[in-house]
Image (cartoon, rainbow, N blue to C red):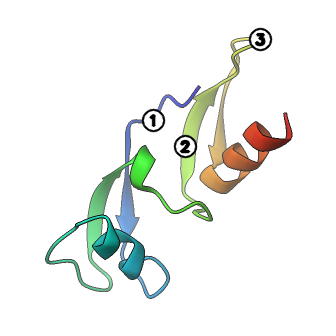
Amino acid sequence: MILTKEVEVKVNNRNIKHFKKLGYKDIKKNKIINVPIKHMCRGSVKEIEVRCDICGDTKILKYQNYLKNMTTG
């Protein structure tokens, strides 16, 4: 389970198209924006706080690693 609700993301060449497609307006490269977790790019290396559904432990993972763990079980 993801505990982090929002993260600060620096807009760059890799993610600017993604955010514009989601409807973000007035974003420019090198600008820092607050983004809800559901809007993050799948390959994001931004760290988020998660809690294990089985044991209840909390830890910090990169978003892409969290997604990888969720798909591999």
Classed neighbour count for the residue bearing mark 3: other residues with Cα under 10 Å, few (<14), some (14–19), many (≥20): few
To which residue does mark 2 refer? 48
Element class at badge 3: loop
Callout 2: SS: strand
Q: Is residue 5 above or below residue 44?
A: above
* Mark 2 residue type: Ile
Front one among 48 and 27: 27
Residue 4 is labelled as 1
**Distance between mark 3 and mark 1 Cα atoms:** 18 Å
- Above-or-below relation of 21 to 36: below
Which residue is found at the position 46% from the left and 57% from the top?
40
Residue found at x 41% / y 73%: 18
Horizontally, residue 3 falls left or right of residue 16, namely: right
Q: Quadrant of the C terminus?
A: top right
Q: Are marks 2 and 1 in contact (CB under 8 Å)?
A: yes
Q: CA distance from mark 3 to mark 2?
A: 18 Å
Vertical position of residue 64 compared to residue 72: above or below: below
Q: Is residue 56 above or below residue 18?
A: above
- Evaluate if marks 3 and 2 touch, with contact meaning CB atoms under 8 Å apart: no
Q: Residue furthest top?
A: 55
x and y percentages locating residue 71 in the rendered image: 77, 42
Farthest-out residue, left: 26
Total labels drawn: 3
The residue pinned by badge 3 equals 55
Q: Identify the mark nearer the N-term, 3 or 2.
A: 2
Left or right placement of residue 38 versus residue 31 in this view = right
The quarter of the picture where the N terminus appears is top right
Badge 1 density bin: few <14, some 14–19, many ≥20, Cα 10 Å = some
